[in-house]
Structures are given as structure tokens and as C-alpha cells.
Image (tube, helix red, strand yellow):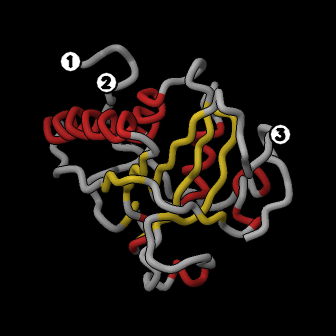
């Protein structure tokens, strides 16, 4: 999808190439509108964009993804400065901003595109994601939740969603957002591991 404007909150480009000093992360945690808003508020995040990943078909549209036939997840692309915010801190934000035990849903949003997912760009990201999953799984189970269903896999092609989805909740502040955490704190990225 063609995306022609800069980030409406951060004022930065949505499409690279980005500076070599920046790194990229990708997360699926339910409806991408709320997921994007969560991450654009994090200090050290350079830009965010919403789109589709981890599916089977090229260049999916929102309507196609909503059928469940493409296998894609609604995701947020996060470009960040690792000198200002660590990947571990982004993982903490990810875990605490949604319920990763719900399978193919987040709250009232149900379907394959609402699954919890971490899509990694390096071996280091993959290892950090797995360590954080195991740590947070223990905390959730201690709080009475079932096991984490989050998929962790290498990032494949990111397809930008239509322009009207980008920074949707900035353009529509009263718009729908189904994102909500469990209230269970994650020790990753905070220096607290117990």
C-alpha cells in the first residue's frame, strides 16, 4: 500500500531506509490501532507504522486479512534508537499491553489477525523474546492465567496497511481500541527479574 505522509505524532518517515543507528522490531498484540499508539508513546521510538505480517499472500488488503484467509497478523512496526530504549524495554511494553494467553483474539476482537506475536529481526531479538516469554509466562500462571500463546518467529515481509489505518487513533482520538493488559507486571527490561 502506498503511504505518503510522515508520522502524524512523531513527524518522522514511516518508510525507510532508516538510519543505521536505528533498529526495527515488530509486534502483534490485537487491533493494530491501539498497538501502534502504545509504542509511539515510548521514549526512544523513532517511528511506528501498522501493517500485516506472518501470512501467506503478497500485498494483502485490510479486507482480505479480515477474512482470515491470508494468515496475516495485524502488527505494528517499531523503529527505535537502542541507545535510548532497549529491545527488552519494548518487550516489557508488549507483554504488559495485552493478554498473551487468549489465542486468536484480544478481548472482543476475534480472528487470526488478532493473535499475539513477536516477529524478530536477529538472533539476539529471538533469544530475548523467548527469555521474556518464559519469564512472563511464570508470572501470568502465578496470577491465575493460562499459558502464553504468543508466536515468536523470524520477521518476514511487512506489508503496510492502508494510509487511513496509520496513526488511526491520533486522527480519531475517540476511535475503538480493544488493547488492554492483564495488570501483571513483566520484569524484563526493568532490571527486576524476581
User: Circle 2 is placed at which residue position?
Assistant: 187
Dot 3 and dot 2 residues touching (CB under 8 Å): no
Q: How many marks?
A: 3
Q: Are marks 2 and 1 in contact (CB under 8 Å)?
A: yes
Sequence-wise, which precedes: disc 3 or disc 2? 3
Residue ID for mark 3: 11
Q: Where is residue 9 in the image (x, y as percent from the top left)?
A: 78, 41
The relative height of residue 123 versus residue 74 in the rendered view (above or below) is above
User: If you read the primary sequence from the N terminus, does the residue marked by circle 1 or circle 3 appear first?
Assistant: 3
**Residue 157 against residue 81 in the figure, above or below:** below
191 in relation to 188, above or below: above
Across and down, in percent, residue 77 comes to 58, 50
Q: Nearer the viewer, residue 161 or 34?
A: 161
Marks 1 and 3, how far apart in space? 38 Å
Q: Nearer the viewer, mark 3 or mark 2?
A: 3
> Of tags 1 and 3, which is closer to the observer?
3
Figure quadrant of the C terminus? top left
Determine the secondary structure under disc 1.
loop
- Is 48 placed left or right of 75 in the picture? right
Residues 54 and 179: in front is 54
Rounded to the nearest whole Å, what is the CA distance between mark 3 and mark 2? 31 Å
Rendered location of residue 10, percent (x, y): 77, 37
Disc on res. 194: 1
Q: In the shown orientation, is residue 105 left or right of residue 12?
A: left
Q: Which disc is residue 53 wearing?
A: none
Q: Identify the image quadrant of the N terminus.
A: bottom right
- Rate crowding at label 2 as few (under 14), some (14 to 19) or many (20 or more) other CA atoms within 10 Å: some
Amino acid at each position: 500500500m502506498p503511504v505518503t505522509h510522515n508520522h502524524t505524532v512523531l513527524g518522522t518517515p514511516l518508510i525507510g531506509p532508516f538510519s543505521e543507528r536505528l533498529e526495527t522490531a515488530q509486534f502483534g498484540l490485537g487491533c493494530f490501532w491501539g498497538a501502534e499508539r502504545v509504542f509511539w508513546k515510548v521514549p526512544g521510538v523513532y517511528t511506528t507504522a501498522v501493517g500485516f505480517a506472518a501470512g501467506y499472500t503478497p500485498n494483502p488488503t485490510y479486507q482480505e486479512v479480515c477474512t482470515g484467509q491470508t494468515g496475516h497478523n495485524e502488527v505494528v512496526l517499531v523503529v527505535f534508537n537502542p541507545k535510548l530504549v532497549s529491545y527488552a524495554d519494548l518487550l516489557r511494553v508488549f507483554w504488559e499491553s495485552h493478554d498473551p494467553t487468549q489465542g486468536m483474539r484480544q478481548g472482543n476482537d476475534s480472528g487470526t489477525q488478532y493473535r499475539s506475536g513477536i516477529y524478530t529481526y536477529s538472533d539476539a531479538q529471538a533469544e530475548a523474546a523467548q527469555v521474556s516469554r518464559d519469564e512472563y509466562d511464570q508470572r501470568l500462571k502465578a496470577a491465575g492465567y493460562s499459558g502464553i500463546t504468543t508466536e515468536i518467529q523470524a520477521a518476514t515481509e511487512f506489508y503496510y496497511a492502508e494510509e487511513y489505518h496509520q496513526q488511526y487513533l491520533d486522527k480519531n482520538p475517540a476511535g475503538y481500541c480493544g488493547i488492554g493488559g492483564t495488570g501483571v507486571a513483566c520484569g524484563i527490561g526493568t532490571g527486576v527479574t524476581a
